Amino acid sequence: MNKYNLTYCTILFTFLAGCSGLKVADIGVDEYRSTSAERIQSEIEKAEIPVAVPLGEEWVYNAGGAFGRVEPILIGDHVFVGTRKGEIHGIALRSGKRVGADGFGDAIDGTPAIVGTDIVIPVSWGSKKGVVSHNLRSGHKSWSLRVPPVRTDILRIDEDVVFVDHSSTVRSVRSEDGSENWVREFDISIPFLASPVELSDDVIAVVDARGHVTAMNKDTGNPVWEYSLGFPVHSDPVTDGSRMYISTTRGRLFALNIRTGSVEWQNVVGREDVRLLSASLFEDSIVVGASSGLVAVYQRDTGLEVWATTTNEAVAARPLVTRDYIFVSSMDRIVRALDRRTGENQWQAELKGRSKSEMAATENSLVILSEPRLIYYFVSESVEVARAE
């Protein structure tokens, strides 16, 4: 082998060694709650994470690809983010350095699910496999499914995962090996743009783009009840274990009884051309953002307004609730911290691009995704001062 070939091989080996794939040997395993009520309560408790303002920019990471409406996944000292380039990036929170990355198709739009040390990934474009389960500790694929593209979130329920694909088919599969539990086909001409949601220990629900809600037995996929809202739905529903809250693209917010599907209340949040984002829950309240720039909080039991405020531009993603603040991103590239009791703006930061994906919080820090392909990590300035001392 001549010296030129030797040099080429050395460079190639170094490149491949640097691209070790998505492998995090010291990844922790999050505690998984055993009942639906505990899981739902755990989600609501996330709204009590303390994040003090003001915050300072700790680091910015270039993910090399744009983001769908994915939510950053926080596991211990790491964050995992999917991109529309089809990659999952693992990043160390303290340093902002990449700990691993790998490609799984041409695009990822929905949020993966974590099952043990596996990340179950929805692939929305450019792959013959619509779902891939990848082990984070070993860096190897556990299994994959040859199904149509999946453009919404993966829902974990016990040892199963549920998802809806581009052919309007809902599937429940075993998280261990991807084997099917059941399949429920809907009208292929009506897409699903909202992710499945768990309502109780026995029931899940899906909402199609025209606003037709179907609650199904989680073990069989058989319908339990159905209700048609009469308004299009493009955002994920949420539940508090009593009601299912659904945002529409026509300015209406619905609260349905999870056992019967009956409407307990509905609010006209804006004009008929106003699109509502997915709602967030905290205490006895619900907050929703709108394409009109409106941010409003309502009582969960009655739907009565607690407060409302407006931003300069359309709200671009689901609001993130923390112990004292509601963080809202808007199309003017501004992220704001609103006092969750009054709606008053307490802090804001300008990003280099618009943030149209969900944010995530850990104690006194935020992870924010923005156009064109940047991941921001903000830390409370009180923490920065303590570090300096």
Image: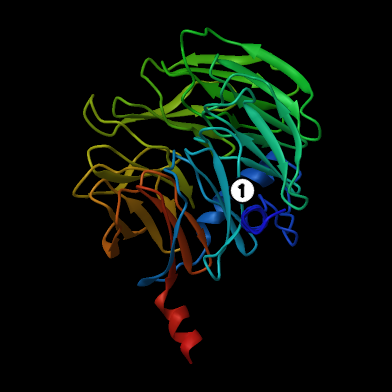
Circle 1 is placed at which residue position?
41
> Could you tell whether 174 is left or right of 319 in the image?
right
Q: Residue furthest left?
A: 312
Please tell me how many numbered marks the rendered image carries: 1
Query: Considering depth in this image, is 281 or 383 the residue closer to the camera?
Result: 383
**Quarter of image, res 97:** bottom right
> Could you tell whether 124 is left or right of 173 in the image?
left
Q: Is residue 238 above or below residue 63?
A: above
- Residue 371 place in picture, x, y as percent: 35, 48
**Residue at screen point 63% across, 58% down:** 7
- Residue 327 place in picture, x, y as percent: 37, 56
**Residue at screen point 51% across, 31% down:** 244
Query: Considering depth in this image, is 227 or 108 the residue closer to the camera?
Result: 108
**Quarter of image, res 337:** bottom left
Question: Could one spot residue 133 in this view of the protein?
Answer: yes
> Could you tell whether 52 is left or right of 125 in the image?
left
**Residue at screen point 69% across, 17% down:** 221
Question: Could one spot residue 217 in this view of the protein?
Answer: no
| Colour logic | rainbow
Q: Residue furthest bottom?
A: 389
Query: Considering depth in this image, is 268 or 289 the residue closer to the camera?
Result: 289
- Residue 302 place in picture, x, y as percent: 41, 37
- Residue 160 place in picture, x, y as percent: 74, 32
Residue type (three-letter) at the residue carrying disc 1: Gln
**Quarter of image, res 60:** bottom left
- SS under mark 1: helix
Is the residue marked by circle 1 packed among few (<14), some (14-19), or many (20+) residues within 10 Å? some
